[in-house]
Amino acid sequence: MNTWSEEAKKDTGFDRKEDIIKWCNEFRLPAIAEAVRHHRPRLFIGVGASNAAEFSRAYFGTSLPLEQHVFAVNGHSKRIRYAKHNGGVLVVVPHLTGGRNGLNSDESLQIVGSFIAGLLT
């Protein structure tokens, strides 16, 4: 995610990473917020830790402080952020594309799944 490859340019239609981020903030996040208002899901999972504040605004209507849950798999620290508000649960997970801090193993996915299930009870 730190670079913007030729493949990313081709796949997204954006020449620069900054352009797709701007587009997401202008169009995608408001569309998510509208879908949340319409469908009122009990759980929203956002992917990409750097977008936690944006996911909070889209889901809760405001940027709430998020708590952290940190765990380790094979010596690598993993962090998810979450908040509960007005009966809704927001969980923001790292990208699933790999990297030592990502959710890149069955074990890390199972731990996160169990944690989320606990938030819903």
Image (cartoon, rainbow, N blue to C red):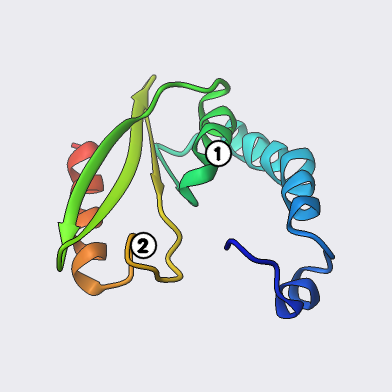
Report whether residue 120 is seen. Answer: no
Left of 120 or right of it: where is 41? right
52 vs 11: above or below: above
Q: Quadrant of residue 98?
A: bottom left
Q: Quadrant of residue 6?
A: bottom right
50 and 114: which is toward the camera: 50
Looking at the rendered image, the quarter that the N terminus falls into is bottom right
Q: Amino acid at mark 1?
A: His
68 and 58: which is toward the camera: 68
Question: Which residue carries the number 1 mark?
Answer: 39
Left of 75 or right of it: where is 81? right
How far apart are the two marked residues, 1 and 2, measured between alpha carbons?
29 Å
10 and 38: which is toward the camera: 10
Looking at the rendered image, the quarter that the C terminus falls into is top left
Question: Which residue carries the number 2 mark?
Answer: 102
22 vs 54: above or below: below
Residue at 17% across / 63% down in the picture?
73
* Residue 102 placement (x, y as % from top left): 36, 62
* Residue 64 placement (x, y as % from top left): 46, 21
Left of 111 or right of it: where is 30? right
Q: Secondary structure at mark 2?
A: loop
48 vs 34: above or below: below
